Amino acid sequence: MFEVPITYNCRRLNVERRVRYQYINILSRKYHAKRRSKRRRQANSLPTPENSAVENDQSESQLPSREQIKEKKMKLGEDYSDSEAETSSEGEDTTKDDNEFANDMNKFEKLFYRKYEKPEHSFEVWYDGNSVNTKKKHELKKTHIHYTRLNRVERIAKKRVEKNVVHMPLVNKRYFDIKSEGYEVLEPLVDIDSYLLKHIEILTQILFSSVSQGNWDIAYRTFSLLIRIPEVDIRNIWGLGTRILMERGQTTRSLEFLKWMSTVYSSKQNFVQSHCHRKAPVFRSGSRTHTPKYALTWLWNCLIKVTELISIEEEKGVNTNEEENDNGSKQSAMDKLTELIDKISEMVLVPPYLDDPEIWFIYSMCHMVHADYLSGKFNCQRLSGSRRDIARNQVTQHIHYVKTYLQNCSQKGNFEYPKQFIQSRLEEFEKRMYEDESKPENMKLQKSYDNTSYSNEDDEENPFQIDESNSFLGNLVEEGIDPVIKTHWEPTMNMDALKFNYNSTDDSSE
């Protein structure tokens, strides 16, 4: 009932695919050649009533006698397959096509799909009339072809392919005869010829039925058995595995599973559908030009998980949701966000992530979350001097990264995102760094910070507060001398010497 998630491939299937696409390519090429030759024989402009008869007479007189015979037989509906004209034109086309395709017999499928939109280019994308590639958009054929001409085109295509079918097995010959007549061959997806394939089929049925019924424990056990079989391609059922782990409350394990998928299954190899045609499509398995969906799912889930942890930390307190890393060390939400940013920065250096607009959008959202967190923690009352400037520069830098990566996202592809909402949020982050200074009670405090020069500008608070019981410092204040400004405190000062000077000063005053 359900498709078995295995890679099933054999020599017979490859030969069938090659013969099928070779026949279709020759058939379509011969048909278009006939139409082009017919257009060339026709006049470029419509004839007027005055000169229509003259133009028709001239066009008929200019045609060779052999072509005139063909046209007459086409009108009468006669068969002229044994004529010399057919053999001569057929021989010329045969030599041309043989020289073109004899070197590489595996290009027939590529030549066939080159004329159409590939499914991975339109996966989960809604196209309107303006965004569709007009070169590959085929309209309905409103022209008709005569039955005799159709038989001739099919007969020429069969003769071209029969040279390669002679040395093929009997199964492939029968398959070609059936397909050339316009019929479809009904056969099972996988021939169950071993106990292992039978077990895989039963486990697959149990897995899908358990997921549909919501029995996640049985589905988890079945999935754990399937992924341990070497013949099973995990890229066909990774979506079910992620859903099962999340439903069982194992969100961390689902992220680890997706990370393992992105690490093990490399996207650096070219995807050749003709070699392993039973594998998952390219938009699910990934290649050098297409990002795998499990990698995108992993990045989105990591970003959502980190954002939830940051919101919980802000509500309950700092570092209340620390989780253990693979090495056993605990990580906070901001550490995980920094790790995610570093991971994406490495991914965007190589294809296919380099040209994927969705990866750049996730990258920009990571910096946006970081800017939101830093701008929320910014406080002008607690920061002064270089500390305040460094905090502002960090927020400004992340905002700059967000704008730059969103621009790359727009340049890489037609990826739509809420531009006005993101722009308003970035402006709000910038206002947070200056809204405390606009208040009148904070402006006076800010002036006192700016006019005060400490020996160490990075000190957030004055470590030397005036004690009310200290008469020496009190006398200095009454005389108008600020001890914080005039006294230069060396970090290696001896506190005993300070006490001695303090006592000697009191004695002299007495």
Image: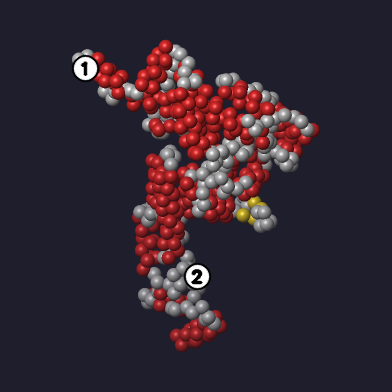
Image location of residue 311, percent across then percent down = 54, 46
Tag 2: amino acid: Pro
Q: In terms of sequence position, does the residue under pointer 1 or pointer 2 come before the other?
A: 1
Tag 1: amino acid: Asn
Kindly identify which residue carries mark 2. Answer: 463
In front here: 287 or 239?
Answer: 287
Q: Is residue 200 visible?
A: yes
Q: Give the spatial CA distance, label 1 vs label 2.
A: 108 Å
Identify the residue shown where x is 61% and y is 26%: 176
Does residue 345 appear to the left or right of 431 in the view shown? right
> Dot 1, crowdedness within 10 Å: few (<14), some or many (≥20)?
few
Image location of residue 41, percent across then percent down = 33, 24
Q: Quadrant of residue 454?
A: bottom left
Kindly identify which residue carries mark 1. Answer: 51
Element under label 1?
Answer: loop
Does residue 49 appear to the left or right of 329 in the view shown? left
Q: Is residue 480 above or below residue 73?
A: below
Q: Is residue 170 above or below residue 414?
A: above
Identify the residue shown where x is 70% and y is 30%: 190
Identify the residue shown where x is 67% and y is 27%: 171
In front here: 251 or 429?
Answer: 251
Identify the residue shown where x is 64% and y is 48%: 264
Element under label 2?
Answer: loop
Task: Say how many tags the image has.
Answer: 2
* Residue 376, numbered circle: none
